[in-house]
Amino acid sequence: MKSVPEKQQDRTATAGSARQIRLREQLTKAVFFCTASFAVIVVAFILLFLLRDGYPIFAAEGILPFLLGPSWAPTAVEPQYGIFPLIAGTLLVTLGAMVFAVPLSIGCAIYIAELASPRVKSILKPAIELLAGIPSVVYGFFGLIVLTNFIRVTFDLPSGETWLAASVLLGIMALPTIISVSEDAITAVPREYREGSLAIGATRWQTISQVIVPAALSGIAAAIILGIGRAVGETMAVLMVAGNAAIIPEPIWNILSPVRTLTGTLGIEMGEVAVGSDHYSALFGVAVVLLVITLIINLSAVAILRHLHEGRTARPGKKPLIPSHISDGIITIVKAAFLVLLLILLLAATPWYVAVLIITLAGAWYYGRDRLSRGQIETISFGLIVASAIIVLAILIIILQDIIINGLPALSWEFLTQPPRDLGREGGIFPAIVGTLYLVTGAILIALPLGVGAAIYLVEYTREGRITRIIRTGVDLLNGTPSIVFGLFGFAFIVLYLNAGVSMIAGQITLALMVLPTIIRTTEESLKSIPQSLREGSLALGATQWQTISQVVIPPAVPGIVTGAILSIGRAAGETAPIMFTAVVFSQRFLPDSVYDPVMALPYHLFILATNVPGSATNKYGTALVLLLLVVGFYAVAILIRTHFQKKIRG
Amino acid sequence: MSESAIITTQDLNLWYGGKHALQSVSMHIPKNRVTALIGPSGCGKSTLLRCFNRLNDLIDHVKITGEITLDDENIHDRKTDVVSLRKRVGMVFQKPNPFPKSIYDNIAFGPRVHGVRNKTDLDRIVEESLKRAALWDEVKDRLHDPALALSGGQQQRLCIARTLAVEPEVILMDEPCSALDPIATAKIENLIDMLKEDYTVIIVTHNMQQAARVSDYTGFMYLGKLIECGKTVQIFEHPKEELTENYITGRFG
C-alpha cells in the first residue's frame, strides 16, 4: 500500500512526463513525415538532374528538331541528334507487343477468373507470378539465343534481331501484368450481374462476353495501359533482341526490320559517352522524353484503377467511369483497331499462304457467326480461351526448360566458388554472386526503413488529403519510372555529383530508390489490413499513438512487410539497368574491400557474356540459371511466408 | 391438388457440403397462380427457389437427390439444357441487379442473347416488357440513360421487365421487396397480381402479410423441411400443423 503523499508525487511525475511523451510523439511523427516526403523529393531530384544534364541539347537543337529530327547519329563526323526514329521504334515495338500480349492475357485472365477449377487456378496463378519474376536480362538472354534464332531460320534472314523479336519478347514480359490486373477486375464484377444474366437464360459465354467483360472494361483498360508502361520502360531484354538500328522500318509494317528504342539507346550508349559532351546531354534528353512518356502512361492507369476502387466501395447508384455509350464507342474503336492490325499482319506476312489463311479464317468467322448455334459459339470461344491459357503456360515451360536443361551442366562447386577466367568463358561466378548479394542487402537496408516509415505515416498519421495525395502521386511516379532512368540518375547524381564514383554504394542507393515504391505499397497494404478495432482498443487503454503503432499495429503486420521486402530483394537482384553505370564492372578477381569499390553482379555478368563474349555457352546458361534460381528463390520464400501467415490468420 | 401443376418436386434433398439444407421436399406448384414460400431465415426457401432454375449449379459442393419436373420433364435430366430451362423459368433477385448498361440494353439483353436482332422487334419487346412491369411511363423518355441511375424500386421493376422480356412461363422471386420502401413494395405487389394472368409466380418472402396479400397458395418451410402447403386462405386461417400456426401467429421466427 502506498501512502497518500507518495501517490500524489506519482501523479505529478506522470504529469511531468506527459509533456515529454507529447514531445516524443511529435518527434516520431515528424520523423515519419520526413520518410514519407522522401519519395516526393527523389522524384523532384530525378527530374531536376535529368533536366539539368539534358538541358544543353534542348537549348542547342531546339525541342521540336530534337523530337522530330529524322536521324540519330551521335558519333558521326557531323553528329545528328534527332530522336524521331527512337520514338517510332519504341511505339512500334510496344504496339507489336500489345498485339501479341493483349488477346493472350485477356483470354488467360478470363480463363482463370471464370472457367478454371480451383485446382487449375492454384497452378496457373503461381506460374504467372513466376513469369513476372524472371529477370529481364534472363528474358533477353533467352530471346537472344532461342527466339532470334527461331526467327532467323523461319523467315530466312541474316539476323533474327528484329522488331518482331523485340515485340514478342516484350509481349511475354507484359503478360503477367495484364493478366493479373485484368483477372482482379473480372473477379471484382459483382456476383449479381452473373446470376442475373444466367437467370435470363444467357449461356456462360454470353454472360462473360456481354455482361462481365463490359463491366470489367475499365479495369482491363488499366491493365493494358500498365502493360504498355512495362513495355515502354523495358531496357535490357529489348536491347538484346531488337537489332538496334536507329531506323524507321521500310515499309512501316516490316516487322522483320531491326529497330531501336529510347531505352535501348540509353543502355547501349550511356556507358561509352564522354561526360559533358553534346552526346551525353542528348542521352539525358532521351531519358527526359522516356520519363515523360512512361509517367503519362502510368498515371492514367493509376487514375483509372483508383476511380474503380472508390467506385467499388461506394456502390451502387454511382455512375460508371465509362458511360455505356462511350464504352460502346471504345469497343467499336478496339474492333476497328483489330481490323487495321489484321491488315498490317496481312501486308507483313511474307509467305503468301499465311495471308490466305488469315483471310480465310476472318471470312469464315464473319459469315459463319450467325449460322452457328449459341452452343457452338460457346464451344469455340471457350476453346480459344483455354488455348490462350495453355499458350501462356507453354511459354513459361519453354523458357524454364531451356535455361534449366542447358544451365545444369555448368553448375559445379568450382563454378559457384571460383572467380571467372578468360573473360568468363572459364572459371566461375563467385564474385558476381557475392556482389549481387552485397548490392541487394545494401539496397534493402536503405529502402526498408524509408519505405516502412513512409507507409506508417500514410496509414497511421494522416487522413486522406492534399499531403497524402502528393505523396501517393510521388510514389506512383517513382513506381512508373523505367529502371534505366534510375540508372542515369544514379550516374549523374551519386556517381558524378556526389563524387562517389562507380561504386557499390552508388548501386545500392540506386536500387534502393527503385524498390522503394514496392516496399511502401506492400507495407501500406498490410497496415491497412489490421482492424481499426485493435487500434481503438489500444488507444482506449490510454496508450499513445506511437505505443499503439509499435506494439499493437506493427507486430501483426510484420509478415506482410517482410513479404514486401523479400519481393523487393528479388526484383533488385535481377535488375541490370540501374547498376550498369553506377556500380558494376565485368571482371574482378577479388571481392570489394569497401562500399566505394565497384563490384561484379550476376545480371550484368550475364548481359556481357551473352552480348560481348562469344563461345561461352555453358557459362552463360549457368549464370542465367543461378540468377534465375536466386530470384525465384527469393520470390518463393516471400510466397511461402505469405501463405503461411494467411493460413495462420484463418485459423 | 385440384389445379394443374407446372412444377412438381418429389423427395427433393439438397446438401451444401455437409449441411442438409433441403430435406425430402415434395410439392406442387399450380399453373398461373402465385405461390408463396414462407418460413424463418435459413429454412431453405431461397435454396428451394434456386433449385427451380438450377442456379445452385453455380455453387461448389452442392449435392441434390430427388426429382423436380417442369411440365413433366425432369430438370436435372442429363438431356436438359440449363440455358433453355432458365429461359422458361425467370428469376428476380432480392437486391435489384440491373447490369451497368442503359435501361434499353438491360431489357434487350435477354432477347438479344436468345437471337433477336431486328431493331423493331427489340423496340416492341422493350416497350411491352416495361409496360407490363408498370415502368414504361416513368422511363419512356430516357430509355438510354444508365439503369443504375434509377431508384431502387424502379430498378427492381426494371429487373422484372428484364425477366418478362424473355417470355418465361414461371417467374421466381426471391424476396423481391426486401430492399424497397413501402410505396415501391405496393407497386411490386400490384404487379405480381397482374402477372399471374400470364405467368406462374413463385415468391419467397419473410413478410407474412405480403404472402397473405399476394399469394393463392403458400408453403411453410422450417429447418429445410416443407411443413405444410396449401391454399393461402387455409394456411393462414386453419393451419393443420402446430408449427405453422406458431409461426403465423408470431410465436417464433
Image (cartoon, coloured by chain):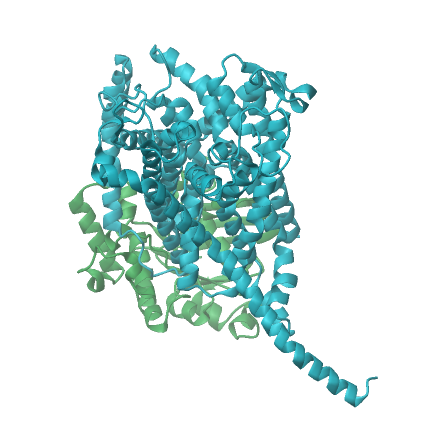
Chain colours: A cyan, B green
The residue most toward the bottom is A4
Answer left or right for A166 relative to A649: left
Could one spot residue A202 in this view of the protein? no
> Which x, y percent locates residue A129?
52, 36
Quarter of the image where one finds residue B147: bottom left
Q: Give the residue at x 18% y 46%.
A: B121
The residue most toward the right is A1
Viewer-side residue, A633 vs A316: A633
Could one spot residue A402 in this view of the protein? yes
Q: Look at the image and tell me in which quarter the N terminus of chain B lies.
A: bottom left
Answer left or right for A602 relative to B122: right
Quarter of the image where one finds residue A110: top left
> Which x, y percent locates residue A562?
61, 47
Viewer-side residue, B117 vs B51: B117
Q: Is residue A157 above or below residue A264?
A: above
Q: Give the residue at x 31% y 19%.
A: A256
Q: Look at the image and tell me in which quarter the C terminus of chain B lies.
A: bottom right
Answer left or right for A591 relative to B12: right
> Which x, y percent locates residue A223?
39, 42
The residue most toward the left is B120
